[in-house]
Structure formats: C-alpha cells, structure tokens
Image (cartoon, rainbow, N blue to C red):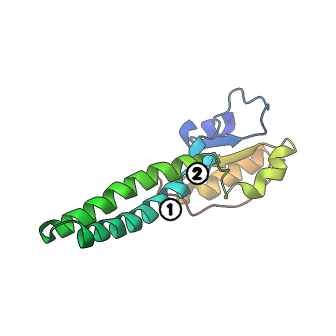
Amino acid sequence: MDDLLLGRVEERHIHFVAKAGTPMDGLHEASVLQKSDMVRGAQIGLVLGAVLGAGAGALFVEFVQDPGWQVVTVVGAAAAVALFGTWVASMVGAAVPSARLRKFELMVEKGMILLMIDVPEHSVEEVKASFSKNHPEAIDHGLEPNIPAFP
C-alpha cells in the first residue's frame, strides 16, 4: 500500500480483498461494489424492469385506459418498473460474490491477499514495473479492461 501511495496512486484506486479474519490494518479494503455482483444485478434489473414495465403499461392501455395517454402510460410504467427492478436486482447482486473475482477465490482462501489497482491505461506499465520491482513475490494476473472510464 505504501509503495503504491509513494508511486502516486491515490488510495481510492487501491483495493484489497482477503479471507475473512485476515488483519487488514492500513490496507484499503475493497467495497461491496468490487466484491459483489451488485452492478451487474442492477444492470439486469434495469433492462428487465424496463421491458416488463413497458409490457405492463401496454396491457394497461389496451384493456383499461382511454387512448389519450398511451405513450405516457407505457413510458411511465417502463420507467417506474425499471427503477424498481434496478433496486431489487442490485440488492440481490450485493449478496452474490463477484463473478470477476471467482478465479481468485482459492488463492484468497489459502491466505493470499488480492490487490486491485485502478489506474489510467497509460500508467499501467509504469505501475506494474514499479510494483514487481519492489514486490517480486506478487503474482500478476493481468488487466481487466471491462471497467468504467477512469475519472
């Protein structure tokens, strides 16, 4: 952690995952967003909620409501159910371990500590070189390009 901070990587971009009970004094532990499938669940809930809401709104317009508010009803139902679906699915996803971290479960259970560093693409090689020089015991498992754009 200290080496990364000295290398000008901000603490909010450094995340550690360890087995339960492992002392993490001075380490920035990964958040629920990084350790669970909360984001993926929210995305699925948003899409499914929008589709189901639009379908329910269309059925409501077809069988119950007068024709004057068709578009508003369908769009409103889609938006309302999409928000509800996002909320529910994100709560479910928070209880599910991250699929991205599944390949590291055995190593973490054996006592190893997983380090995730979020850096801009142009800094990756510099950070990797510096870190491997100072910590030859570390095992590099590559990059995860499927993350949001760096702030």
CA gap, disc 1 and disc 2: 10 Å
Looking at the rendered structure, the kind of residue marked 1 is Ile
Q: Are marks 1 and 2 in contact (CB under 8 Å)?
A: yes
Left or right of residue 67: residue 50 = right
Q: Residue furthest right?
A: 110
User: Which of the two labelled residues, at mark 1 and mark 2, occupies the earlier sequence position?
Assistant: 1
Q: Which residue is mark 2?
A: 93
Up the image or down, 111 lies above or below 21; here it is: below
Say which element carries label 2: helix
Q: Which residue is mark 1?
A: 44
Image quadrant holding the N terminus, namely: top right
Up the image or down, 18 lies above or below 100; here it is: above
Question: Residue at 84% across / 45% down in the picture?
Answer: 109
Left or right of residue 147: residue 98 = right
Question: Residue at 33% across / 67% down in the picture?
Answer: 54
Looking at the rendered structure, the kind of residue marked 2 is Gly
